[in-house]
Image (cartoon, rainbow, N blue to C red):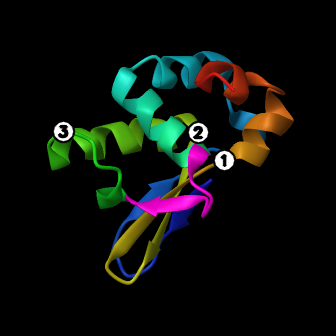
């Protein structure tokens, strides 16, 4: 599924729930930075964060890559609002497709 977001003139890809692939998800989560992003999102009571609010020690280009890998794998969803880009976990989709996987990977 392709989705146009907010005021950015771009199309962001989010795979449909039925297209989620466990191997692709596990590859995305195998990187320590991406796993930390997912852990932060999983522990955030608000459910989503702006891309710049993770407090990770990485360049903007590096973080952009990590956010894209997670989104393309179907682990996260991206939403634009004005000049901000928000990231959230696709917890419901992941749970429906692969029950218990997310909690097992993040250590809950």
Q: Which residue is rendered at x = 60% and y = 64% of the image? A: 46
**Separation of residues labelled 3 and 1 (CA atoms):** 23 Å
Which of the two discs, 3 and 1, sits closer to the camera?
Answer: 3
- Counting residues from the start of the chain, the first of labels 2 and 3 encountered is 3
Instruction: Determine whether, in the image, residue 108 is placed left or right of residue 68.
Output: right
Residue 67 among those drawn in magenta? no
CB under 8 Å between callouts 2 and 1?
yes
Quadrant hosting residue 50: bottom left
* Residue on which disc 2 sits: 75
Residue 75 horizontal/vertical position (percent) = 58, 39
User: Element at badge 3?
Assistant: loop
Choose between 94 and 2: the one closer to the eye: 94
Q: Is residue 33 left or right of residue 96?
A: left
Residue at numbered disc 1: 90
Q: Residue at x 56, y 18 (%)?
A: 26
At horizontal 18% and vertical 39% (from top left) the residue drawn is 58
């Amino acid at each position: 599924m392709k989705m146009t977001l907010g005021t950015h003139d771009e199309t962001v890809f989010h795979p449909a729930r039925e297209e989620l692939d466990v191997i692709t998800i596990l590859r995305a989560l195998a990187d320590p930075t991406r796993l930390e992003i997912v852990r932060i999102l999983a522990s955030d009571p608000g459910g989503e964060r702006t891309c710049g609010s993770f407090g990770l020690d990485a360049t903007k280009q590096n973080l952009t890559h990590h956010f894209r890998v997670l989104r393309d794998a179907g682990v996260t969803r991206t939403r634009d609002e004005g000049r901000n880009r928000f990231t959230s976990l696709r917890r419901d989709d992941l749970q429906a497709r692969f029950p218990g996987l997310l909690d097992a990977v993040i250590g809950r």
